Amino acid sequence: AISPHLLVDAFTDRRYHRQRDDCMDWMDQGIALKTACKALSLAPLCAALAMTLTFVVSPGQALLAAALPAACLWALKELPADCMGRDYREPGAWAIRVLAVAAIAWAVQTPEKPCILPVCALVSMALNSLRVPLGLPLGSFIPYSACFTFGLAMHLDKDAVLEAAGASPVQLATWRLWPCVAAVFSAVFFSLALAWWSFCWVRGNHGRIQDSMGPTLSVGRIILYSIVNGIGEEFEFRMLIFGGMLACPLQDNSVQILWIALILVLQAAYFALLHCHGGFPSGA
């Protein structure tokens, strides 16, 4: 025979779990509503910034530049967030996606040939905000979304994309020495700075990235990851994002220096926050 106490306990336990599930569903709905309101308030701010920038650059470039502050928010507050595996539908991520849809709509409906590279760069950021490319094999090292969108841009307007990326035949034939010297100096200087940070500042304690990657690393893998990751980051952040914001001529050449300074700061901030909050080189 089954004890009545066991029946009461089983009923109480089922009721507790049902109430807990109902509570969590209610919390999910409340969080979704709250973050939707935040996204609706953030996206118009980015759209207003983009409308202001259209007096200087093309709409595609303006939308890409306006999306970078939202991308910084996503990298700083939303990308690392993981509460029991729940998707909080972050406002920064949704702002990026809304701006990407607006950029696609502009590219489709514009009568003349659009400046396609910034649109593809923004689509790449929107795909990354879904975290799907990060879940693919070596997703932290291989920029799948950037490769896909850059290939699409090459298919649609190869000459303009190569020129914006600094890889057109004319640019390669007329290369100058000082950019190469600056690149080599930067590589040596920042490699030494990172080595000093690793050995002297954090003394080998690199945070959670060390726990996840440290056991799998060997000398060969370190060299391979360094090459693949370095090329991928230059490809995604310099050729695609930075190149996209330089792809079209400015409507007012008098603000060219200010525009270059602005986009340098925006893409560098996004790049830095992705690394710093991801554990390297912050040591968090």
Image (cartoon, grey):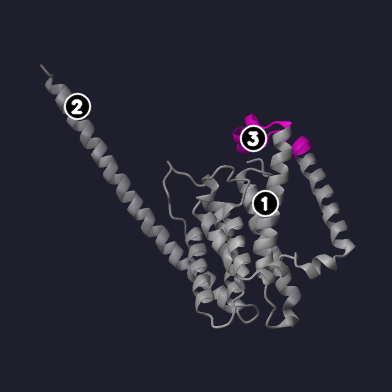
Disc 1: which residue: 232
Tell me the quarter of the picture where residue 192 sits: top right
Q: Quadrant of the N terminus?
A: top left
Q: Are marks 1 and 3 in contact (CB under 8 Å)?
A: no
Marks 2 and 1, Cα distance to the nearest angstrom? 57 Å
Residue mark closest to the camera, 2 vs 1: 1
What residue do we see at 69% from left, 61% from top?
A: 239
Residue 130 position within the rendered picture, expressed as x and y whole percent measured from the top left: 49, 54
On screen, residue 85 versus residue 73, left or right, reads left
The dot on residue 7 is: none
Residue mark closest to the camera, 2 vs 3: 3
Question: Callout 3, which amino acid?
Answer: Gln
On screen, residue 148 versus residue 253, left or right, reads left
The dot on residue 9 is: 2
Residue mark closest to the camera, 1 vs 3: 1
Residue 64 position within the rendered picture, expressed as x and y whole percent measured from the top left: 59, 68
24 within the magenta span: no
Tell me the quarter of the picture where residue 178 sits: bottom right
259 or 26: nearer the viewer: 259
Is residue 19 depicted above or below 181 in this figure? above
Mark closest to the chain's N terminus, 1 or 3: 3
Give the residues in magenta.
198-219
Residue 116 position within the rendered picture, expressed as x and y whole percent measured from the top left: 60, 71
Residue 4 position within the rendered picture, expressed as x and y whole percent measured from the top left: 12, 22
What residue do we see at 61% from left, 33% from top?
A: 211
Question: Callout 2, which amino acid?
Answer: Asp
Could you tell me if residue 182 is visible in this image?
A: yes
Instruction: Determine the main secondary structure of the stretch shown in magenta.
Output: helix
Disc 3: which residue: 210
Q: How many residues crowd around disc 3 within 10 Å: few (fewer than 14), some, or many (20 or more)? A: some
109 or 5: nearer the viewer: 109
